[in-house]
Image: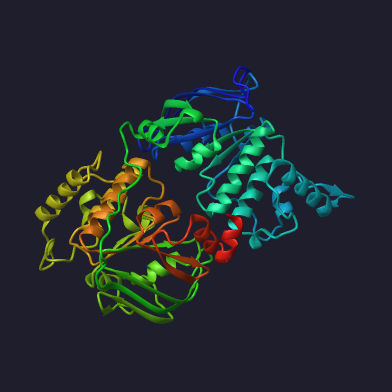
Amino acid sequence: MNDKTSAPLLRLTGLRKFFASSGVLAVADVSLDVHAGEVVALVGENGTGKTTLMNLLFGALPMDAGSIEVDGEPVAIKGPEDAIRAGIGMVQQHFALVPSFTAAQNVMLGREPLKRGALDDAEAEREVGALGERLGFPIDPKKLVAALPIGLQQRVEILKALAGDTRLLILDEPTAVLTPKEADELIVSVRKLAALGTAVVFISHKLPEVLAVSDRVVVMRRGHIVDEMPTSEATPAAIARAMVGRDVLLSATVDHIAPGAPVLEVAGLDASQVSAGDSGLSDVGLTVRAGEIVGVAGVSGNGQGNLVDAIAGLRKIDAGSIKIDGVEVSGMSPRGVRRAGLAHIAEDRMHVGLNRAATLEENAVATTVFTRRFNRAGWLRRGAIHTFARKLIEQYEIRGAAPTRIIESLSGGNLQKIVIGRELEGSPKLIIANQPTRGLDVGSIEFVHRELLAARGRGAGLLLVSAELEELQRLSDRIVVLYEGRLSGPFDRGQLSTYEIGALMAGQSLSAAEADA
């Protein structure tokens, strides 16, 4: 238990960071104390400065002003090496492990024990095994990292950050790629770590886990700390209100709608693996009906990207059939698939969904510029394009935007509004929404959920791919699970528990989930 009456382990005073290239004051004179043995949850809207603040503390970015004290002594942190020497460790969202090394070799990288001038792997394995058991992150130190599931890879990354004399650990969105069971195990381990006296800063946008893991919640908005509260007095609604400055509807209402005819029919779909980051597909069968949302659950990299690309005409398939509204589209170009009735909210809105170096007008018609609405005999109808862009800005409240302004400086939530407004225009038959709320704050998530449900209400069929299991359970009429390119399900809303879905995501049987529950 942390002692708030004692001097803080860490004190940040007046930290500031201004990005001249974008004109953004990302961290605005922020001051923060963190005590030994305390778990501080750092929350806020997307782009509000949370990760930037921690990168200043860890030395990954230079600060423009401010000071850092550890145990009451000022420390100069000009790089990660200085932070590590000061007892500060950080685990980023994206792991930096060597897949061909064992867990022990990764943890001890750069500080390997030697025996007669050679690496002593046995001693490294002993030390790492003991460290994991003592700190609550047990692993098999002899296992190759490439053979470990994501949850255990994260333990390796955390132990790597704790292997020195680390007294404060920063975890940036640590549950983003974990199954529900792995996320629960992480929370238990973090609490054990805090009980041993280590301070933890836990960055997350998942409010239930914030309440489960932390002692105190610190809220950032537009580069400032605007509120902090003991977790014992916090509620999801209060945290969300502090994050966005207004009341937020945290749970969308999903009305019952009798589904119509199939708008997507996938049968016997095989697709080879085209990148190391995503599985191929094997005998996938799937149906989406008008007026329903079918959610696709799975840990990232299990074939979701290939499934979406195959349906959208962005990759060739090896076998099988894909029909949209009864029309075979498996051999069509992306434009042909769109003409058949597809709208596609791409996973990577920054590079695939949008061109950030282009204007809002250009992005608004990027997928429809050759239609009669915006094009006559090869001539652009600029008045119609401008009117449509203005409509998107007003209808979707795209802040800081103008039709002819480059969109590069817009926030993630406002960029996603452009994509959604463009894709939902024209009443598409089938909508693929691939990670539509990734990286968004609670206010933007509320908007996305509302628009997807409205499209469902208008009779569209939606294929919702999301790493957020809570989101899938909240919005989906039926859920399927992808694991290593094979599909389980479909399962009706409420048919499976969170742990049962998580077991399928990990390649386990439903009986394994019942044993873990």
Q: Is residue 334 above or below residue 71?
A: below
* Left or right of 172, for residue 294: left
The image quadrant of residue 431 is bottom left
In front of the other: 14 or 491:
491
Q: Quadrant of the C terminus?
A: bottom right
Estimate the x, y position of residue 38 in percent, counting from the top left. 60, 30
Q: How many marks?
A: 0
Q: How is the image coloured?
A: rainbow
* Left or right of 7, for residue 55: left
In front of the other: 313 or 207:
207
* Left or right of 501, for residue 408: left
The image quadrant of residue 145 is bottom right
Seen at 15% across and 47% down, the residue is: 390
Q: Is residue 342 visible?
A: yes
Seen at 45% across and 55% down, the residue is: 467
In front of the other: 197 or 53:
197
Q: Quadrant of the N terminus?
A: top right
Q: Is residue 408 visible?
A: no
Estimate the x, y position of residue 281 in percent, counting from the top left. 47, 73
Q: Residue furthest bottom?
A: 319
In front of the other: 118 or 229:
229
Seen at 70% across and 52% down, the residue is: 139
Estimate the x, y position of residue 464 in percent, counting from the top left. 36, 60
* Left or right of 391, for residue 285: right
Q: Residue furthest right?
A: 116
Seen at 64% across and 43% down, the residue is: 189
The image quadrant of residue 347 is bottom left
Estimate the x, y position of residue 83 in percent, counting from the top left. 62, 33
